[in-house]
Amino acid sequence: MKNVVVIGAGKIGSTIARLLAHSGDYQVTLADRSTEQLALIEKHEAISVAEIDISDAAAMVGLLTGKFAVLSAAPYHLTIAIAEAASRAGVHYLDLTEDVESTRRVKAIAETANTAFIPQCGLAPGFISIVANDLSRRFDTLDSVRMRVGALPQYPSNALNYNLTWSTDGVINEYIEPCEAIVEGHLIEVPALEEREEFSLDGVTYEAFNTSGGLGTLCETLKGKVRTLNYRTIRYPGHAAIMKALLNDLGLRHRREVLKDIFENALPSTLQDVVIIFVTVSGRKEGRLVQETYANKVYSAVVAGRMMSAIQITTASSICAVLDMLAKGELPAKGFIRQEEIGLDAFLKSRFGHHYEQRAYADKMAS
């Protein structure tokens, strides 16, 4: 039995705690500063709760000391405080952050730590980098790596064609901050919400555009090995134009709290969502230019006895799968670990990672 702490009792944090508790191999302390949020957590013998202010460094170290790992499902701006507490307490650290600067600082903390530091363990960044690196390793030389991910409502009903299924702070951050990309072999920054494209999958038309953080550390890993590398978020057509108007024309990029309040009071949440994962890699094999694509859709489903949204399933199962691999000695126990260092086959065979094979299983049943 491994004792772990999950920071953040929101949609994703509570899902992580539930998955780990139902596995029978983890005792989970779910921590949050909100008494009201903690009161909503369903009782389980393997889950206890702790009210804590993350800014209280001594309290954080006290909470983490003696535990196996801490998993951060807190907003990205709290990442560093949690990582520093993990280092001081001598516990393994995993997070879901998409924030580029936070990950750079986590990497610096890991350099002097005696435990593993594994940031960006979600869907994107996270699983998407595992898939992209797996495809890339099949080529003699690489030309392009294009990664597309979206968490969308199955039944869009507003002008944005969007429902809140994930962290509002995270969505706003990825729409505003600069995005890394490799263009003509050079690592550069490109603006968010730009380079819009359209594509079709299963007869449905989508748009995709630059957003920040989805590449994780893959740019650094593949720099000098690929001509083109980019990440774009998938939405239904029309979303990007409205977001540009809100952020640029109305100036809400400089008033994030106002935009967050609008989103959380005007956009309903939904469990009826779909996560789309679309990765295309091209390069040369035995002298021939070849392309390989990974395409998948994950839908909301009943997991661990509860109906969960697709974004809850994919995000929570990713970090749980990485934790499981770490606990079993399948990942290094010290230092900074990139998502692309994790094998796709091992990930999908794990008891948590197999949730990504939901569609493939459904197709087999239908046939």
Image (cartoon, grey):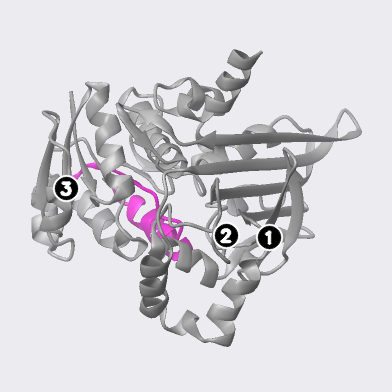
Residue 248 at x, y percent in the picture:
57, 83
Which contiguous range is marked in magenta?
89-114
Crowding at mark 3 (Cα within 10 Å: few <14, some 14-19, many 20+): few
* Residue topped by disc 2: 161
Who's the residue at 36% across and 69% down the image? 265
Who's the residue at 68% across and 41% down the image? 279
304 with respect to 162 (left or right): left
Query: Cβ–Cβ below 8 Å for labels 3 and 2?
Result: no
Asked which quadrant contains residue 294, the reply is top right
Asked which quadrant contains residue 185, the reply is bottom right
* Residue topped by disc 3: 40
Taking 366 as reference, is 45 above or below it?
below
Mark-to-mark CA distance, 1 and 3? 36 Å
282 with respect to 100 (left or right): right
* Residue topped by disc 1: 237
Residue 34: mark in rendering: none
Query: Quick one: SS at disc 2?
Result: loop
Mark-to-mark CA distance, 3 and 2? 29 Å
Who's the residue at 59% across and 48% down the image? 149
The type of residue carrying mark 3 is Leu
Q: Is residue 129 visible?
A: yes
Query: Cβ–Cβ below 8 Å for labels 2 and 1?
Result: yes
Residue 303 at x, y percent in the picture:
36, 28
